[in-house]
Image (cartoon, rainbow, N blue to C red):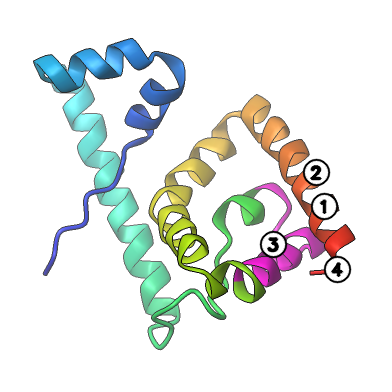
Amino acid sequence: MKHIRYTSASELTEQAFCEKKMLFAVRLGRRESRLRRQAQAVGDRAHEAFHRDAMSSEPRLSGAAGKPWCFIASEVFGTNASETRLLRAFRDRVLRRYAAGRAFVRLYYRHSPVIACSLHSHPMWRAATYWLLKAVVAVLAMWRI
């Protein structure tokens, strides 16, 4: 089975918080404590279980079309909220039609489960994401997606 390397929440945070620290880690090697490695292993196992569960719920779906998942919007608005449905429609009707859109969808599915989990436990980030996605939804609604 091909091993998929996921970007950890810690790596995403480093990219957003301190790009110099990330650059040093790339150049000089990452120095991780035993506790961090243990926490990372727990997170990796949880992500793999989540991924297996998601793939087993709809195994016939190999592409983005019709996939019921919109992890971040579902976390922020709810699974069947009108905003979540509009974002899914945009994915299916617009993004899937173009190579760049399909690449974005692959990137989204690779990283969004971790982001959605972190939003669950960080109310300020959740609120910021809510308002950001509300703005995106408003623009998409004007386009009548």
**Magenta-tinted stretch:** 76-91
Label 2 secondary element: helix
Residue 8: quarter of image: top left
Q: Which residue has dot 3 on it?
A: 87
- The residue under label 2 is which amino acid type? Ala
User: Tag on residue 139?
Assistant: 1
Badge 3 crowding class, 10 Å Cα cut-off, few under 14, some 14 to 19, many 20 or more, is: some
- Residue at 28% of width from left, 19% of height from top? 22
User: Is any atom of residue 54 visible in this view?
Assistant: yes
- The residue under label 1 is which amino acid type? Val
Identify whether 39 is placed above or below 45. Answer: above
Label 4 secondary element: loop
User: Tag on residue 54?
Assistant: none
Residues at marks 3 and 2, CA–CA distance in whole angstroms? 12 Å
- Residue at 80% of width from left, 43% of height from top? 135
Residue 143 location (% of width, % of height): 84, 63
Give yes or no for residue 78 being in the magenta stretch.
Answer: yes
Q: Earlier in the sequence, mark 4 or mark 3?
A: 3
Identify whether 117 is placed above or below 10. Answer: below
- Residue at 46% of width from left, 23% of height from top? 16
User: Tag on residue 135?
Assistant: 2
Q: Are marks 4 and 3 in contact (CB under 8 Å)?
A: no
User: Is any atom of residue 30 visible in this view?
Assistant: no
